[in-house]
Image: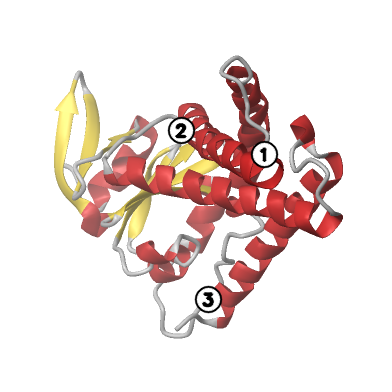
Amino acid sequence: MRNAAEWARRGREIGIYALIGGFLTVIRPYNGSGNLPLWAAYLFWTGLVIAGSYTAEMTRITLERSGARLPLPILLAVVSVTSALTVTALIILLEYMVSGRLFSAGQLPHLFGLVWVIAAAMTAVGFMIERTVLAPVSEPVPGASPEETFLSRLPVKYRTAKLYAVSSEDHYLRVHTSHGEELILMRLADAMRELAGADGLQVHRSWWVAKGAVTDTRKQGGKLSLVLASGKEAPVSRTFLPEVKAAGLAA
């Protein structure tokens, strides 16, 4: 059963889809939806927004489960292309069903290009919205550990995971867990404040590691790394080496 926070998140998500659908209904890019009445045009565009968003999410999940670790710009590019392909196919089908209009082979690249521009913008904006407006707020939960409270920021599938580490990537954090990795919009300094009571420590200017997640150490070229249970290696900088040794994570 969904809790109040999940229902609130779903409500915000539906509201965002409704707003985007309304905006596209007004501007009607590439003359889509033809001469449909306003209510039908709204359903047309909102349906395309939902289909594109669903495709984007499924693409992201598939890449994640395949073990792919793509840089954020490439990930957004791949997601926007798959979303644009789905929406383009739906436009071709719906335009034929509604008005009997058929796109010629020569029109298809132009149509896809127009759709992709909108899909790319929506993918980028959607990513920001998901990590801000739709992101669950991490509030102290009675009886929950700092790690469990922090993981409540992530999608549902991560809520029962073990937190291994968090690493900074520009304005984002990559959260490393026993159920995989996830990006969230957050500063490392803020994450560390939330994890102040957790059994872990900062080992690098861009890494915080849970002590229980460290399974081994690796030293190469004079540089020390902590090997996590996931196989990922967290670098240890000279600044934090004394704390790492004091914690018993390195000799």
Instruction: List x then y, in percent, for residue 107.
Output: 63, 19
Q: Amino acid at mark 2?
A: Leu
Q: Residue at x 64, y 49 (%)?
A: 49
**Helix, strand or loop at mark 1:** loop
Q: Residue at x 41, y 78 (%)?
A: 144
User: Where on the picture, by quarter, is residue 24?
Assistant: top right
Q: Is residue 12 above or below residue 84?
A: below
Q: Which residue is mark 2?
A: 75
Q: Is residue 152 above or below residue 69?
A: below
Q: In 3D space, how far apart are the residues under numbered discs 2 and 3 (Cα atoms)? A: 32 Å
Judge left or right: residue 174 versus residue 102: left
Nearer-N-terminus badge (2/1) = 2
Q: In 3D space, how far apart are the residues under numbered discs 3 and 1 (Cα atoms)? A: 56 Å
Q: Amino acid at mark 1?
A: Gly
Q: Which residue is mark 3?
A: 140
* Quadrant of the image containing the C terminus: top left
Residue at the far top in the pictured view: 106
Residue 198: mark: none
Q: Which residue is mark 1?
A: 100
